[in-house]
Amino acid sequence: MAKTKLERIATLDEQIAQLSNQKKQLQQKHKADERKARTRRLIQRGAILEGFIPEAETYTEEQIQAFLKETLNTDYARKALRRLNPTQGGETATTKPETAPQGKATLAPAKAEAAQQEAADPAPVGAGGGARNGG
């Protein structure tokens, strides 16, 4: 038995509503998955950072942030980052790596080195600030 045009329209409207709900559910799941991945990444990277800073729990977030800004404001740090991610810096991953000091980093020597580099280096990494860092 053939459906009337009105019945066919009603059926299509139902299908549209169902597909719209499926789309919303998939979008919500995608956003949730992205949030979970970001949270996992932040936790993992924070753990890596704490592994390289002796007694990291004794420093405030502001001290850690200042340490990272000063440490990453060096030519060595920018070159190292470009070697790790050549699509961002123009160099290739086959560039010969510079030698870095071995062992755990400490805040005091890094600050001294950063202060020396700051005078010689006018283009800091992340100078534009970020939405989460108040910049």
Image: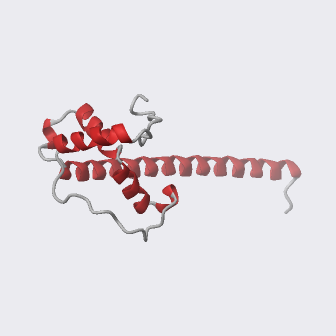
Q: Residue sitting at 84 percent across and 57 percent down?
A: 3
The residue nearer to you, when weighing 71 against 75, is: 75
Q: Is residue 1 above or below residue 27?
A: below
The residue nearer to you, when weighing 80 against 36, is: 80
The residue nearer to you, when weighing 106 against 43, is: 106
Q: Quadrant of residue 109?
A: top left
Q: Is residue 64 left or right of residue 30?
A: left
Image location (x, y in percent) of residue 66: 28, 35
Q: Residue sitting at 75 percent across and 52 percent down?
A: 11
The residue nearer to you, when weighing 11 against 104, is: 104
Q: Quadrant of residue 96?
A: bottom left
Image location (x, y in percent) of residue 112: 22, 40
Q: Is residue 38 above or below residue 83?
A: above
Which quadrant does the N terminus fall into? bottom right
Q: Is residue 106 left or right of residue 94?
A: left
Instruction: Tell which residue pokes out farthest to the front in this image.
Output: 120
Q: How is the image coloured?
A: secondary structure
Instruction: Tell which residue pokes out farthest to the top in this image.
Output: 134
Image location (x, y in percent) of residue 79: 40, 56
Q: Is residue 121 left or right of residue 43?
A: right
Q: Residue sitting at 42 percent across and 46 percent down?
A: 35
Q: Is residue 54 above or below residue 79?
A: above
